[in-house]
Image (cartoon, rainbow, N blue to C red):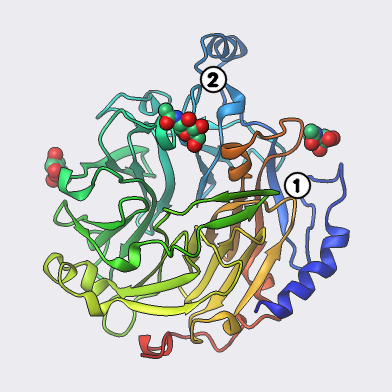
Amino acid sequence: MFRGLIFVSFLYLGVGWVAGLQRWGTQFGQAPLLERFFWKTLDFAYPDAASRQLAMLKGEFIPENALPVGIEIWRNKLFVTIPRWRNGIPATLNYLSLDTNRGGSPKLTPYPNWAQNKAGACGSAMTTAYRIHADACDRLWVLDTGTIGIGNTTVQACPYTLNVFDLTTDKILRQYRLRPEDINMNTFIANIAVDLGKGGCNDAYAYLSDELGYGLIVYSWEQNKSWRVTHSYFMPDPLAGDYNIGGLNFQWGEEGIFGMSLSPVSGDGFRTLFFHPLSSRREFAVSTRILRDEQLSQNSYHEFQVLPERGPLGHCTSSVMDEKGLQFFNLIDQNAVGCWNSLLPYGPQNQAVVVRHDDALIFPADVKINNGLLWIISDRMPVFLISTLNYTDVNFRILTVPVKDAIAGTVCENSPWGYVSNSVWWEK
Ligand SMILES: *[C@@H]1O[C@H](CO)[C@@H](O)[C@H](O)[C@H]1NC(C)=O
Ligand SMILES: *[C@@H]1O[C@H](CO)[C@@H](O)[C@H](O)[C@H]1NC(C)=O
Ligand SMILES: *[C@@H]1O[C@H](CO)[C@@H](O)[C@H](O)[C@H]1NC(C)=O
């Protein structure tokens, strides 16, 4: 599996990494994977040096504690999220301007401002954001988990709240607290998918994957209402909980439904939601026709489809699909990103590794597609969580590669593009 591309990747790994040249424009592989931005530690654009110094003295900013996990691109803004896993994170939702920053290690600016990033200020600010989504209606969807800490240190400072911003005005359009029934004692939600239907900007649904509570929460924009869906496919595979990443061996045995991606709208007017538990090598699928209908979603066990396994080293957190049905997904065991063209049946024979780098892509935490460009952030997350990062080394990178070049010569470059009915994705 992934045979053709692994060959290409290995071939170029040799020339890819030259110490001292890890700068904007550095090419890692055959596909021109560019390191756009890189950081040893993150920094924030305080109004002046004195306020930054004061924040550090007061412990409000501890550079070593900030780990970026999610990205999104909208026009000239590159958003970066930082969960409040440890103390000293001044803002969870941030951006940098792609106009004024051409490379290097730019400072992050809180979005929409500092005040709305104040930890524990329930109702008026966001505490922790993971993955975020900018939709075609210029809205930014941000789920605030309300949590401070990670694992057994977690404190639920504020309720889970979905925030939707108008990116053209930077004003909040909608704030929706999840209902108590939407979550449970184990709930941990780090991912969001946004489903814009054919009916315009009001025809929008958000899907929130509850990784540790094993559920999927659906939010309808039009109804301003949420409901929780459960299914055994949201659970982890007990045989898939062992990981070897960044030189570390560890177990994430409890990690259920995580990554989600949405197909283009198909002939019946609905998309397909592809999803996978983190501790699993399998992909699953369900039509949004089921999820969008509160009643149907409670009672449609057999509407959920099982797709073949990705194969060994197939753990995946984030995935994304473009409007042509081309899916990209991170392969966290392989320091790589893979592709699948949904014109072809799901399975390793129809997947390829598009980029791989054993230093620059250690834990590619998020992948996004914007204007024909694939964006990747890598952050060495397991090293941060289980061991300690080496802060004299580059730890976080944001990289890009044109989709066209990424898939060139792979099984994913299957033309003509077009979209066919669901039936090709799996054999029933
Ligand atoms: C929390 O988890 C860490 C690592 O998993 C462990 O070392 C620590 O003892 C735990 N603390 C408590 C209070 O359970
Ligand atoms: C959405 O519902 C919440 C209650 O769950 C309410 O506080 C809020 O005002 C509603 N928003 C709109 C736009 O209807
Ligand atoms: C930390 O990273 C620097 C820069 O890459 C390297 O020279 C050094 O050996 C690393 N330290 C450790 C303990 O790995």
Q: Which of 18 and 419 is in front in this view?
A: 18
Q: Can residue 85 be seen in this view?
A: no
Of the residues under marks 2 and 1, which one precedes in the sequence?
A: 1
In the image, is 384 to the left or to the right of 342?
right
Q: Residue furthest left?
A: 295
Mark 1 residue type: Trp
> Within 10 Å of the Cα at label 2, are there few (<14), some (14-19), or many (20+) other Cα atoms?
many
User: Where in the figure is residue 11, as x and y percent of width and height?
Assistant: 84, 69
Residue identifier under label 1:
24
Please, is residue 168 above or below residue 53 in the view?
below
Please, is residue 50 above or below residue 205 in the view?
above
Rendered image: mark on residue 225: none
Picture quarter with ligand 3: top right
Q: Which of 233 and 52 is in front in this view?
A: 233
For marks 2 and 1, give the CA distance.
Answer: 27 Å
Would you say the beta carbon of the disc 1 residue lies within 8 angstroms of ligand 3? no
If the image is split into quadrants, where does the N terminus sit?
bottom right
Residue identifier under label 2:
61
User: Where in the figure is residue 359, as x and y percent of width and height?
Assistant: 75, 50
Q: Quadrant of residue 28?
A: bottom right
Please, is residue 354 above or below residue 187 in the view?
below
Mark 2 residue type: Phe
Q: In which quarter of the image is residue 62?
A: top right
Instruction: Name the residue at 27% across, 27% down.
Output: 122
Q: Nearer the viewer, residue 115 or 41?
A: 41
In the image, is 264 to the left or to the right of 59?
left
Instruction: Name the residue at 63% across, 41% down.
Output: 383
Q: Nearer the viewer, residue 180 or 397?
A: 180
Q: Can residue 60 be seen in this view?
A: yes
